[in-house]
Image (spheres, rainbow, N blue to C red):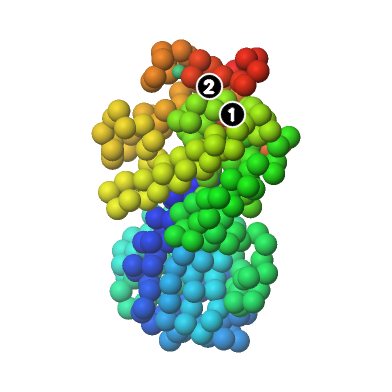
């Protein structure tokens, strides 16, 4: 699943291709979107802005409507020049937005809705900017309070709740715990407020670093290797622990562990020596 940094980069690229330019074409396989377009044609409207909210991508149009899409596991947006060959089969096309220069295509986008300002504000699934670690409006202190309120849950799982902290995905979850030396399976109640605050600050720092202009497409949290290793086959090459089960910890040499966690059985990686449980007990990986 794409993490918040991926959606942010997609929004930035789409914004550059679409914002401020009149729409010259719109097509979709979603009946509700084409019906909306029949009633309120997008043709001739401008794209005002493209923004990411956690894992949602919002395209704002000049007459007030907003197209909200979620990529789930397989969806993606591509940008092509007219006449350029698409990198996915036509049958995967779900949404097309064109202007005089570019064709933006949402492939296999599973969730797409057209919103008014009012319905957007009421859609509780789309996080507000104050919750999004990549938003300039992000409120870190409020995020600490939301995490602390979930005392009986395991910290790494809480980091994934999109209404607690939007933008953190499964890779960053393990990396944040390692960098702050917190055991991913420890209960929030066993952490001090300062530790949670440090984790939130770490989340913001790591994820923001991954949307800088030169940050490339892969996630990088471990600086030991050069950034932008092009098409690195090992996803763990630029990470501290994620994807590194059985490999030596980059800090202490202990073997990295892996275990499924939480109600959704998401995979978690950690170092048993660098990240100890508060009561000294350990969990087998
Ligand atoms: Zn270690």
* Marks 2 & 1, CB-CB < 8 Å contact: yes
Q: CA distance from mark 2 to mark 1?
A: 8 Å
Q: Looking at the picture, how far across and down is residue 211, in whole percent?
A: 37, 50
Q: Looking at the picture, how far across and down is residue 83, in whole percent?
A: 31, 68
Q: Quadrant of residue 77?
A: bottom left
* Helix, strand or loop under label 2: loop
Q: Looking at the picture, how far across and down is residue 220, in whole percent?
A: 37, 38
Q: Please state, as top left, top right, bottom left or bottom right, where the C terminus lies in the image.
A: top right
* Helix, strand or loop under label 1: loop
Q: Quadrant of residue 205?
A: top left
Q: Is residue 13 left or right of residue 72?
A: left
Q: Is residue 96 left or right of residue 72?
A: left
Q: Is residue 237 above or below residue 271?
A: below
Residue 184's tag is 1
Q: Is residue 272 above or below residue 208?
A: above
Compare residues 278 and 49 and report the one nearer the observer.
278
Residue 107's tag is none
Q: Looking at the picture, how far across and down is residue 65, in whole percent?
A: 55, 78
Compare residues 230 and 249 and report the one nearer the observer.
249
Q: Is mark 2 within 8 Å of ligand 1?
A: yes
Q: Which residue corresponds to mark 2? A: 275
Q: Quadrant of residue 222?
A: top left
Dot 1: few (<14), some (14–19), or many (≥20) neighbours within 10 Å? Answer: many
- Dividing the image into four equal quarters, which quarter contains ligand 1? top left
| Residue for point 62% across, 71% down | 120
Q: Is mark 1 within 8 Å of ligand 1?
A: no
Picture mark count: 2
Q: Is residue 163 left or right of residue 210?
A: right
């Amino acid at each position: 699943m794409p993490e918040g940094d991926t959606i942010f980069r997609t929004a930035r690229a789409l914004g550059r291709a679409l914002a401020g330019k009149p729409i010259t074409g719109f097509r979709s396989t979603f009946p509700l979107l084409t019906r909306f377009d029949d009633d309120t044609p997008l043709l001739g409207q401008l794209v005002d802005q493209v923004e990411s909210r956690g894992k949602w991508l919002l395209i704002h149009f000049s007459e007030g409507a907003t197209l909200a899409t979620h990529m789930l596991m397989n969806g993606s947006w591509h940008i092509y020049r007219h006449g350029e060959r698409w990198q996915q089969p036509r049958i995967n096309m779900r949404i097309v937005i064109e202007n005089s220069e570019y064709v933006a295509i949402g492939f296999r986008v599973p969730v797409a809705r057209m919103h008014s300002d009012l319905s957007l504000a009421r859609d509780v699934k789309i996080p507000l900017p104050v919750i999004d670690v990549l938003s300039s409006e992000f409120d870190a202190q409020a995020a600490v309070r939301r995490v602390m309120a979930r005392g009986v849950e395991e910290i790494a799982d809480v980091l994934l709740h999109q209404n607690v902290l939007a933008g953190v995905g499964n890779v960053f979850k393990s990396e944040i715990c390692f960098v702050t030396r917190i055991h991913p399976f420890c209960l929030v109640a066993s952490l001090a407020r300062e530790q949670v605050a440090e984790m939130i600050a770490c989340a913001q720092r790591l994820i923001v670093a991954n949307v800088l202009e030169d940050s490339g497409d892969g996630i990088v949290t471990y600086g030991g290797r050069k950034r932008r290793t092009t098409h690195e086959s090992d996803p763990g090459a630029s990470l501290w622990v994620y994807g590194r089960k059985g490999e030596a910890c980059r800090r202490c040499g202990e073997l990295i562990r892996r275990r499924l966690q939480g109600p959704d059985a998401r995979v978690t990686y950690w170092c048993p020596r660098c990240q100890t449980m508060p009561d000294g007990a350990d969990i087998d990986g």
